[in-house]
Amino acid sequence: MTPPTRTVMWFRRDLRLADNPALLDACAADGVLPLYVLDPALWDPAGPSRRGYLAASLRSLDAAFRQRQTRLSVLRGDPVRQVLRAARAVRAERVHVAADFGPYGSRRDRAVAEALAEHDIELVRTGSPYAVAPGRVRNGSGDPYKVYTPFSKAWSEHGWRDPVEAPTGVGWLGPEDLAQGPQGVEGVEIPDPALPEGLTLPEAGERAARSRWQEYLDEGLADYRDHRDRPDLDATSHMSVHLKWGEIHPRTMLADLRDRGGPGTATYRKELAWREFYADVLHHRPETAREYLRPEFAAMEYDEPGAALTAWQEGRTGYPVVDAGMRQLRATGWMHNRVRMIVASFLVKDLHVEWQHGARHFMHWLVDGDLASNQHGWQWVAGSGTDASPYFRVFNPTTQGRKFDPDGVYVRRWLPELADLGPDVDPHEPGDVPGYPAPIIDHATERREALARLEKIKQ
Ligand SMILES: Cc1cc2nc3c(=O)[nH]c(=O)nc-3n(C[C@H](O)[C@H](O)[C@H](O)COP(=O)(O)OP(=O)(O)OC[C@H]3O[C@@H](n4cnc5c(N)ncnc54)[C@H](O)[C@@H]3O)c2cc1C
């Protein structure tokens, strides 16, 4: 008789049971240990939104395992050591993961695979957080795409597999199995970090992701194409946070979109393709997490970040749509895409502060903070990214506000100082309002300054 086989399912950015190919692979064994490792390299620098959301999502995953009469085992420390400890403690032959293509994650996984291999334990990578794994979509010459439109066409033609069901009939191993035997390991509790006052996060977990998605399919998608740029209507799906933590897989969403059709579907697919494109770009050019994708922009003259950066971070620039966005970010860990573009442009082109400062602030507060989408979203606005929005096209925060928040509903929602403006006051150029700052810069002047600095690097 062959001895029973055992595996570890190491969860990272795939905090779900359904449509999780790595989990299905792990579950081919007789005993499966669901494991999460709190990695100080990721936890310590994380802001309150990320910590709070991750902890809630882990609790939700743990609750799903409790329904299956087991628990999620949680360890804290360097994954190279902790994953090996867990695998040895339960005498696993394989550790299963969804492949990570980010700069840190791929380095970490190589180190974990080596450490496991020394003990004849295999790290098995199945699937990824994307419909098509980064690196797969190539042009006719076998090179990666550098711009979005041909990538998205080739991505669509490449296609992806259908979703898979959650595993059933599994012999789960829990914390007591982990703690048993001569090499037993004690797990830790899922942390419960306190949120700063005024920050409210969306509901976390696979069930919340599914129900939000279903609700959006039924009630939001039809208007997505026409309303997605309107922060006042809040007409986008808010699925970014669920995708970020893998509480739902994009191919589940793509399958639902295919089955549904109708207005909004094609536009929504295109947005998911942006997420896949940026992951692909970062995979091929990992240094662009910090450095300019177009190196010529490194020569641009920027100002030292000082009081202007602080005013921007705190939502006190005197430009209502910028301030509303920055306060929405701190209050909810999320900001509308159109407003992300406006505030990013304001920091880089009106305040002349390098994009990395803004990207860092976003990563600190965003609940959906994702290195690929964030850094490349910033580089796009800064003019140094893929498909660069031409640098000379500088968003005017006042006219952008009037166009995309025509009645000022969005700015009034996030700026209590402007909530009671009279009907004859333009909420995007309110003038003197008690308690609300006057504009910290003159947009027309700073636009000219930005263009002058651009001219210098072009010469
Ligand atoms: C400066 C800047 C920083 C950004 N930082 C992030 C980030 O850290 N994490 C993040 O997920 N998105 C980021 N984005 C992209 C976009 O703003 C968010 O994905 C979107 O606002 C999330 O809200 P939603 O889920 O309601 O979007 P929806 O409009 O409902 O879009 C559906 C999904 O498509 C994807 N998507 C949409 N637009 C983009 C885009 N421009 N780039 C990549 N994916 C996209 C997201 O996964 C999103 O959930 C950034 C954009 C900019 C301009």
Image: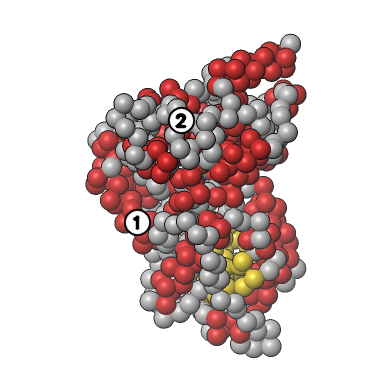
Instruction: Name the foreground residue: 360 vs 266.
Output: 360
> In which quadrant will I find the C terminus?
top right
The residue wearing badge 1 is: 210
Count all numbered tags in the image, as a single digit: 2
Give the Cα separation between the discs numbered 2 and 1: 46 Å
Q: Report whether the residue tagged 1 is closer than 8 Å to ligand 1.
A: no
Question: On the picture, is 382 further left or further right than 270?
Answer: right
Mark closest to the chain's N terminus, 2 or 1: 1
x and y percent of residue 405 in the render?
36, 31
For image coordinates 36% across by 62% down, the residue present is: 207
Residue 421 tag number: none
x and y percent of residue 64 in the render?
41, 71
> Under tag 1, what secondary structure?
helix
x and y percent of residue 193 in the render?
55, 67
> Under tag 2, what secondary structure?
loop
For image coordinates 47% across by 56% down, the residue present is: 198
User: Farthest residue toward the top?
Assistant: 459
Where is residue 190, by image quadrant?
bottom right
Q: Are marks 2 and 1 in contact (CB under 8 Å)?
A: no
Instruction: Name the foreground residue: 374 vs 332.
Output: 332
* Callout 1 amino acid: Arg
Question: On the picture, is 402 further left or further right than 299?
Answer: left
For image coordinates 41% across by 44% down, the residue present is: 416
* Callout 2 amino acid: Asp
The residue wearing badge 2 is: 432
Q: Is residue 184 visible?
A: yes
Mark toward the viewer: 2 or 1? 2
